[in-house]
Image: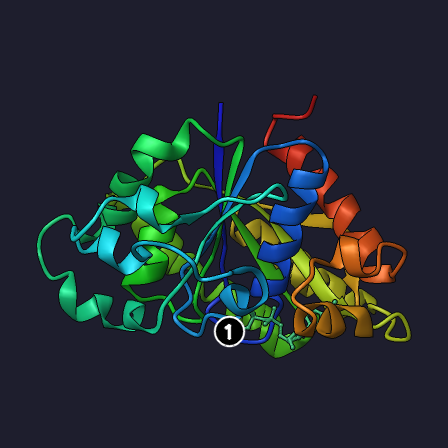
C-alpha cells in the first residue's frame, strides 16, 4: 500500500518545503521507498534536491505532452520530480473539465512503486494545491505558533471541504505541525487553546512533535543536503525524525 501526503498551507514561510524535504528524506532513512514532488513553481525544494537531469518535466506530464516517468530523478535517498516555473501557468492551461484530477491521473501508473509520495505545494489555494489535495490520502499542515499563522490555518477549511465534497471524499487532514519553534517562547495557555480549537475545527490534532528552530536547516538547504545527512544531531533533525515516526503511525503503515 502506498500513501500520498500533501504539505499544505496558503501562507508562505511556514516550513512547507522544509517539512516536505525532511519528511521524504526521513521516510527514506527508515527504509521506505519515497517520491518527493515539488509542485511549487518557486522551486525551493527543487533547488535543494534536484539535479535537473530529466528528459521531460512535471508540467509536460500535467499538460499531457509526455509521460510522467520521464520527469522522475532516481536516487538512493529517494526519487524526486522537480518543479519548473511554467507550473504557474497551469491555471490558464488547465481549463477543461477534470482539471482538478490531472495530478491524480498522472500518478496512478507509478503510485504502486512507492511507499510514500510527498508533495510540496505553493503558498496559494489555486488549482495546483487542489490537484495535490485531490491526489492525496493525507494533508499535513505546517504552521508557526503565532496568531496570524494559526488564523490562516482556519481559512484552509473551505478549500479542504470543497475538495472533499467534489473531488476526494477520502482526504484526511493528518495533523498540524508546529514549525520553527523557538524554545525561548513558551506556548501560553491561550495560544495552545486557539491552536487546539483550530485543529478540532478541521477535524484533526496537533502532532506531539514541535520542530525547533535551528540554523542547520538553512545551512543544509544552501549546501543542497538533507538535514539528516548535514546535521544529524541538530534540534530540527531530531525533531523531524520524531515527526516522521508520528506520520508513520498516523498513516497506519507503521511496521
Ligand atoms: N526549523 C527551522 N529552523 C530554522 N529555519 C527554518 C526552519 N524551518 C524552515 N526554516 C527556514 O524558513 C524559511 C521558510 O521555510 P520554507 O521555505 O520551508 O517555508 P514554505 O512554507 O515552504 O515557504 P513558501 O510557501 O514561500 O515556499 C526558509 O528559509 C527555511 O530555511
Q: Secondary structure at mark 1?
A: loop
> Where does ligand 1 appear, by image quarter?
bottom right
Q: Residue 168 in the image: x percent, y percent?
A: 32, 40
Q: Is residue 118 left or right of residue 226?
A: left
Q: Residue 93 in the image: x percent, y percent?
A: 15, 65
Examine the rendering and report whether any part of residue 6 can be seen.
Answer: yes
Q: Is residue 161 left or right of residue 117?
A: left
Which of these two is toward me, 214 or 100?
214
Q: Is residue 157 above or below residue 14?
A: above
Disc 1: residue Cβ within 8 A of ligand 1's nearest atom: yes
- For the C terminus, give its image quadrant: top right
Looking at the image, the residue that sits furthest to the bottom is: 148
Q: Is residue 111 left or right of residue 3?
A: left
Q: Is residue 109 above or below residue 184?
A: above
Q: Residue 223 in the image: x percent, y percent?
A: 70, 70
Scheme of colours in the image: rainbow
Number of numbered discs on residues: 1
**Crowd rating for badge 1 (residues with CA inside 10 Å; few <14, some 14–19, many 20+):** some
Q: Is residue 227 left or right of residue 22?
A: right
Q: Residue at x 61, y 41 (%)?
A: 76
Which of these two is toward me, 102 or 227?
227
Q: Residue at x 51, y 60 (%)?
A: 50
Q: Residue at x 77, y 53 (%)?
A: 228
Q: Is residue 222 above or below residue 209?
A: below
Which of these two is toward me, 220 or 158?
220
Choose top left, top right, bottom left or bottom right for residue 39: bottom left
Q: Residue at x 27, y 60 (%)?
A: 59
Choose top left, top right, bottom left or bottom right for residue 45: bottom right
Q: Residue 186 in the image: x percent, y percent?
A: 87, 71
Examine the rendering and report whether any part of residue 161 can be seen.
Answer: no
- Pointer 1 residue: 11
Amino acid at each position: 500500500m502506498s500513501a500520498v501526503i500533501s504539505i499544505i498551507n496558503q501562507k508562505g514561510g511556514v516550513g512547507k518545503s522544509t517539512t516536505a524535504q525532511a519528511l521524504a528524506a526521513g521516510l527514506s532513512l527508515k527504509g521506505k521507498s519515497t517520491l518527493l514532488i515539488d509542485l511549487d513553481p518557486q522551486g525551493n525544494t527543487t533547488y535543494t534536491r534536484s539535479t535537473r537531469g530529466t528528459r521531460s518535466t512535471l508540467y509536460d506530464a500535467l499538460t499531457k505532452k509526455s509521460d510522467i516517468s520521464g520527469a522522475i530523478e532516481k536516487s538512493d535517498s529517494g526519487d524526486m520530480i522537480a518543479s519548473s516555473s511554467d507550473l504557474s501557468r497551469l491555471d490558464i492551461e488547465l481549463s477543461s473539465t477534470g482539471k482538478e484530477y490531472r495530478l491524480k491521473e498522472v500518478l496512478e501508473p507509478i503510485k504502486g512503486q512507492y511507499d510514500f509520495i510527498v508533495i510540496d505545494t505553493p503558498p496559494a489555494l489555486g488549482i495546483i494545491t487542489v490537484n495535490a489535495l485531490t491526489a492525496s490520502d493525507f494533508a499535513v499542515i505546517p504552521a508557526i505558533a503565532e496568531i496570524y499563522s494559526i488564523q490562516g490555518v482556519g481559512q484552509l477549511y473551505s478549500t479542504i471541504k470543497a475538495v472533499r465534497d467534489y473531488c476526494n471524499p477520502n482526504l484526511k487532514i493528518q495533523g498540524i505541525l508546529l514549525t520553527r519553534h523557538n524554545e525561548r517562547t513558551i506556548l501560553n495557555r491561550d495560544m495552545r487553546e486557539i491552536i487546539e480549537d483550530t485543529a478540532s475545527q478541521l477535524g484533526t490534532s496537533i502532532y506531539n512533535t514541535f520542530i525547533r528552530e535551528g540554523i542547520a536547516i538553512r545551512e543544509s538547504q544552501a549546501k543542497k543536503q538533507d538535514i539528516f545527512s548535514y546535521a544529524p544531531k541538530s534540534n530540527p533533525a531530531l525533531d523531524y525524525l520524531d515527526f516522521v515516526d508520528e506520520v508513520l503511525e498516523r498513516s497506519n503503515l507503521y511496521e
